[in-house]
Image (cartoon, rainbow, N blue to C red):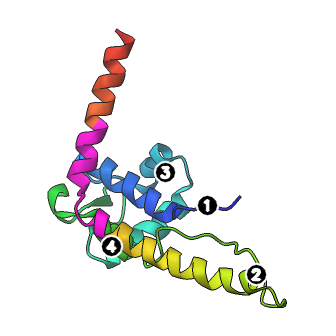
Amino acid sequence: MSDIMNSEFIIALHALAYLDHRRTKVSSEELAKSICTNPARIRKVMAKLKKAGLLITREGNSGGYELSAPASAIRLSDLAQALQQPLLKSGWRSGTLNTYCMIATGMGSVVDTLEASLNEECLRHLSHITIEDISRQLLVLHKNNNNKEE
C-alpha cells in the first residue's frame, strides 16, 4: 500500500512544531531523533522550507534551524506550498486505457480530477491552521496523557 499523505509534509510539520517548542537552534540530528528518520532526509525537507523563507539556518558547531517568524504567522498551507508536492497522492489507478470498457478507460481521469480537488480543499483548510495551533494541540495532548498516568 502506498502513502496517501505526503511524508515530507509530515516531517515539515513535526520539525516546525519541534522548533517552536524548543525556541532555539536545533540540529538536523536532533530533529531526526525526534521525527524518527535520518538527518539527510531532514536536511532535504528543511532546505525546501528555508528556500520558502520559513526557516533561518546557521552552519557549524553552534548552527541549526530556527523559525523565521512567530509560530502564529506560519500557516500549514505555507508548509505545503513550500514542499511543492500534492498533500494527497495515490500512486495507483484502477482500469486501463487498453480496453473498450467505459469505466476502465475513464476512471483514472475521474480520480485525477477528484485528487486535484481534494488537494485544493486541503490547502484551503490548512490556511486556517498555524504552527502555534499545532503546538497548542500537542500541549493539550501532553497534559491529558500526564493526567492519565496519575
| Residue 135 shows up from this direction | yes
Please name the residue shown 68% across and 85% down the image. 106
Q: Are marks 2 and 4 in contact (CB under 8 Å)?
A: no
What label sits on residue 32 in the rendered view? 3
Q: Are marks 3 and 2 in contact (CB under 8 Å)?
A: no
Task: Provide residue 138's location: percent of width, then percent of height.
Answer: 31, 39
Q: Main secondary structure of the magenta part?
A: helix
Q: Label 4: few (<14), some or many (≥20) within 10 Å?
A: some
Residues shaded magenta: 124-138
Figure quadrant of residue 22: top left
Marks 4/3: CA distance? 17 Å
> SS at mark 1?
loop
| Residue 56 shows up from this direction | no
> SS at mark 2?
helix
Q: Upstream in the sequence, badge 2 or badge 4?
A: 4
The amino acid type, in three-letter code, at marker 1 is Asp
- Residue identifier under label 2: 104
The amino acid type, in three-letter code, at marker 2 is Ala
Please name the residue shown 37% across and 56% down the image. 13
Q: Upstream in the sequence, badge 3 or badge 2?
A: 3
3 or 2: mark nearer the eye: 2
Please name the residue shown 35% across and 66% down the image. 59
Q: Label 2: few (<14), some or many (≥20) within 10 Å?
A: some
Q: Quadrant of the C terminus?
A: top left
Q: Upstream in the sequence, badge 4 or badge 1?
A: 1
4 or 1: mark nearer the eye: 1
Task: Provide residue 11's location: percent of width, then percent of height.
Answer: 46, 57
